Image (cartoon, rainbow, N blue to C red):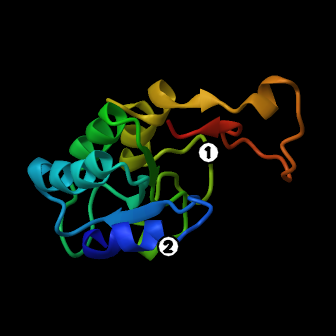
Amino acid sequence: MRNHAHTVFDADPNRNTIFSIHMYGVYEAADTVRDYLDFFDSAGLPILVGEFGDWHTDGNPNEDAIMAITEELSLGYLGWSWSGNTGGYLDMVNNFKANSLTDWGKRIFHGNNGIATTAKEATIYASGGSTGGTGGTAPRGYLYA
């Protein structure tokens, strides 16, 4: 993606392209995470970490580095996944139950640079706007910051 990011971004006349990287196997070292994200940040190209977990079958991604570096660079991240994915090892909660966090769920929500400390309430919810969903007990109305 780095090799063609400028070409892709420059081809978008509206400048509303954002790049998304899934950080798994090869992102075990903090330097590798930093190098990749710094490239986009230094080039002024918008990027987010669109998927990562605390472990993967093809390697152990460095979730601490991913979360710290995205916070430092004011980039977004999306931890993967809520529930019901890949035999459960990437799940943040057990059986879709918001109050039954897995170890990964505890880490991404309450650990350093976790969602509980970095998220900001979306203004639509602060003004009493509708969530538009079917309800439930999952945390709603927050953006990854």
As drawn, 1 above or below 31: below
Nearer to us in this view, 93 or 14: 14
| Residue drawn at 59 percent across, 28 percent down | 120
Q: Amino acid at mark 2?
A: Ala
Picture coordinates of residue 103 (x, y %)? 36, 46
Towards the viewer: 115 or 73: 73
Q: Position of residue 49 (x, y in %)?
A: 39, 55
Q: In the shown orientation, is residue 54 left or right of residue 117? A: left
Horizontal placement of 138 versus 144: left or right?
right
Mark 2 or mark 1: which is in front?
2
Rendered location of residue 117, percent (x, y)? 46, 25
- Dot 2: few (<14), some (14–19), or many (≥20) neighbours within 10 Å? few
Q: Which residue is mark 2?
A: 11
Nearer to us in this view, 29 or 2: 2
Helix, strand or loop for disc 2: loop
Q: Provide residue 67's location: percent of width, then percent of height.
A: 32, 41
Placement of 65 over or under 39, stated as above or below: above
Residue 1, quarter of the rendered image: bottom left
Q: Quadrant of residue 19?
A: bottom left
Q: Residue 98: give its label.
A: 1
Secondary structure of residue under mark 1 = loop
Q: Is residue 19 left or right of residue 72?
A: right
Q: Amino acid at mark 1?
A: Ala
Question: At 52% across and 52% down in the image, what residue appears?
Answer: 93
What distance separates the C-alpha of mark 2 from that of mark 1? Answer: 41 Å
Above or below residue 37? Residue 26 is below
User: Residue shown at 32%/29% (left/top)?
Assistant: 112
Residue drawn 78% across the image and 24% down it: 126
